[in-house]
């Protein structure tokens, strides 16, 4: 099975590139080579969406804002890397 591919689509009109880049660095620092890729995709209209292999992990309007790093990592793990242990950031 191929490693998961993460796509972060962000609104250029809202200047969310830094937020998207920070989210990308968080998942890369945590999951490293267990990921196939992390891609930033510019968009418009207030979009901020994070997908893994085409499955939505987070959508700003539907989920009520932006994820914190721990929540994003939990959702990524639960969706694409279920055997991965998140260590201290894991809620008991």
Image (cartoon, rainbow, N blue to C red):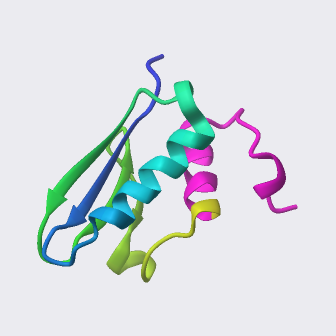
Q: Position of residue 7 (x, y in %)?
A: 32, 46
| Vertical comparison of 84 with 45: above or below | above
- The outermost residue toward the right is 92
Instruction: Out of 55 and 42, give the one closest to the viewer.
Output: 42
Classify the position of the C terminus by image quarter: bottom right
| Vertical comparison of 24 with 37: above or below | below
Q: Where is residue 78 in the image (x, y as percent from the top left)?
A: 62, 47
- The outermost residue toward the top is 1
Q: Does the magenta stretch include residue 90?
A: yes
User: Residue 17 vs residue 58: left or right?
Assistant: left
Q: Where is residue 61 in the image (x, y as percent from the top left)?
A: 33, 80
Residue positioned 44% across, 58% down in the render: 22
User: Residue 43 vs residue 10: left or right?
Assistant: left
Instruction: Out of 69 and 78, give the one closest to the viewer.
Output: 69
Residue positioned 14% across, 62% down in the render: 43
| Vertical comparison of 63 with 69: above or below | below
* Span highlighted in magenta in the image: 71-92
């Amino acid at each position: 099975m191929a490693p998961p591919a993460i796509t972060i689509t962000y609104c250029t009109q809202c200047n969310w590139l830094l937020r998207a880049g920070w989210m990308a660095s968080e998942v890369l620092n945590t999951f490293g080579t267990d990921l196939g890729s992390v891609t930033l995709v510019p968009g418009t209209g207030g979009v901020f969406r994070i997908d893994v292999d085409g499955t939505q992990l987070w959508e700003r309007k539907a989920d009520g804002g932006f994820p914190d790093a721990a929540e994003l990592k939990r959702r990524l793990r639960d969706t694409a890397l279920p055997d991965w242990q998140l260590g201290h950031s894991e809620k008991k």
